[in-house]
Amino acid sequence: MIIIAGHELVAAEERDAFVEAFRGMVTRARDFDGCLHIAITADSVDPERVNVTEVWRDVAALKKWRRQAKGPTVAKPTYADIKRYDASDGGSLF
């Protein structure tokens, strides 16, 4: 399992439009074989923060998606800290 998680910062007045620009791509990804979860969302506390979370079945599915994802054209974030993690196991939180 591949997990991509982190956040970006954009100008507060541009954040909601930035998140909205990804709606179509997120919708397509959720229907894509191998996508277990994806969300690009406005943070509930920081008006400049955009949270990014993706969970993919495996590297092959992620690579196949990336080759055809066609993300939106948006302003470059002022800061980004998004990392990829390889997970070998998972289970119920509680």
Image: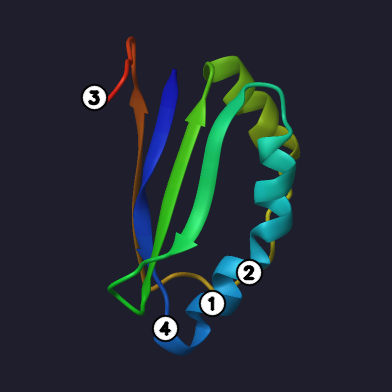
Residue 22: image quadrant is bottom right
Work out how far the residue at label 3 is from the one at label 2, CA to CA, in angstroms.
32 Å
Residue 94, label in figure:
3
Q: Residue at x 68, y 39 (%)?
A: 29
User: Residue 36 at x, y = what percent?
Assistant: 56, 27
Please tell me whether mark 2 or mark 4 is closer to you in this view. Answer: 2
Three-letter residue code for mark 1: Asp
Please tell me whether mark 1 or mark 3 is closer to you in this view. Answer: 3
Work out how far the residue at label 2 is from the one at label 4, CA to CA, in angstroms.
14 Å
Q: Alpha-carbon neighbours of circle 2 within 10 Å: few (<14), some, or many (≥20)? A: some
Three-letter residue code for mark 3: Phe
Verify CB contact (< 8 Å) between mark 3 and mark 2. no
Verify CB contact (< 8 Å) between mark 2 and mark 1. yes
List the residue tagged with mark 4.
11
- In the image, taking residue 22 as reference, residue 10 lies left or right, namely left
Mark nearer the N terminus (3 vs 4):
4
Work out how far the residue at label 3 is from the one at label 4, CA to CA, in angstroms.
37 Å
Three-letter residue code for mark 4: Ala
Mark nearer the N terminus (4 vs 1):
4
Residue 16, label in figure:
1
Residue lying at the far bottom in this picture: please name it. Answer: 13
Q: Residue at x 68, y 32 (%)?
A: 65
